[in-house]
Image (tube, grey):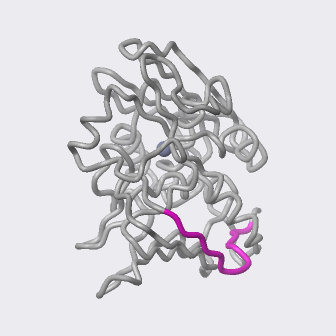
Amino acid sequence: MERERTIAKPVSVSGIGLHSGAKTFLTLKPAPPGSGITFFRPDLDPSLPIPARIDYVGDNRFATTLRRGEAEVATVEHLLAAVYSLEVDNLEAWLEGPEVPSGDGSAQIFVDLITAAGLKVQERDRSIFSIPYPLEAVNPEARITAGPEPGNGLSLEFRIAYPRLQVPEQTFHLRLSPELFRREIASARTYGFLEDLSGLKAEGKGKGGSLENAILISDGKVVNPEGLRFPEELVRHKILDLIGDLALLGRRVSGRVAAQYSGHCLNHQLVREISKIMK
Ligand SMILES: [Zn+2]
């Protein structure tokens, strides 16, 4: 039986929020066995813990925001993807500010942070939920399915295309492991289309976005002078987001998840379906 893990010591990083543009300071701290991943907003009074669970999802149009009462923590998905993929079960994330720091728009800063902290094995057996039968969430444009797969672990598959924006189909799949996450997924950055920027700004989002923390695409071409980190960096980032959303199950899962054109809203629908049968 595998044991649960937390980080070995507190670690901190600061930065700006991708959507709020706010300066923000994040400290990750070890947490007791069985406690899961919990956010805190020490800059607010009162400061209630916000569990990183699907029941606490608020706004999910452009990123995943967790909410409890008036307290919010925005854009949690890249941090949660790193935490899940590096197999950290229990953690406290203390956030001074409304949004998790963006880093370079990928999960790399969180991988570096957790690596700097080191991992600590805890005195509790890890509980893994195996998806027992096929489940799905669909809308007219997108689909995401989950189902059983032989063996332990999580297989992920994603397909995207933006024909309207001249981005042809990209697909990627992997069987998640800490090593593969570090090598293939962690550094894939978030992205946006110049054609959509006015809509994003009108919603008051993307205020902290720049070529330092996002890939910008215009007329099907990458605007960032350094180009892409992988030919299919966009779909790799979609897998990163998906892992972050699956982490909201609050428990490790075994099975296969396949998505076509899905985003946070639909990912969360699937997570709710899985969560219903976990109880
Ligand atoms: Zn993302």
Question: Image quarter for residue 184?
Answer: top right
Residue at (54% x, 42% y) in the render: 131
Residue 14 in view: yes
Tell me, yes or no, whether the highlighted magenta stretch contains residue 12: yes
Quadrant for the C terminus, please.
bottom left
Q: Is residue 14 above or below residue 150?
A: below
Residue 232 x/y as whole percent: 62, 25
Foreground residue, 211 or 189? Answer: 211
Residue 119 x/y as whole percent: 75, 70
Foreground residue, 142 or 225? Answer: 225
Q: Which residues are magenta?
A: 3-15
Q: Is residue 77 left or right of residue 195?
A: right
The rendered magenta stretch, by its main secondary structure, is classed as strand
Residue at (62% x, 66% y) in the render: 89
Q: Is residue 201 left or right of residue 213?
A: left
Tell which residue pokes out farthest to the front in this image. 225
Residue 216 x/y as whole percent: 47, 32
Residue 242 in view: no
Residue at (38% x, 64% y) in the render: 22
Foreground residue, 122 or 164? Answer: 164
Q: Is residue 170 above or below residue 241?
A: above
Residue at (76% x, 62% y) in the render: 1
Foreground residue, 247 or 203? Answer: 203
Q: Is residue 26 left or right of residue 279?
A: right
Tell which residue pokes out farthest to the bottom in this image. 45
Q: Is residue 216 above or below residue 252?
A: above
Residue 48 x/y as whole percent: 35, 81
Tell me, yes or no, whether the highlighted magenta stretch contains residue 104: no
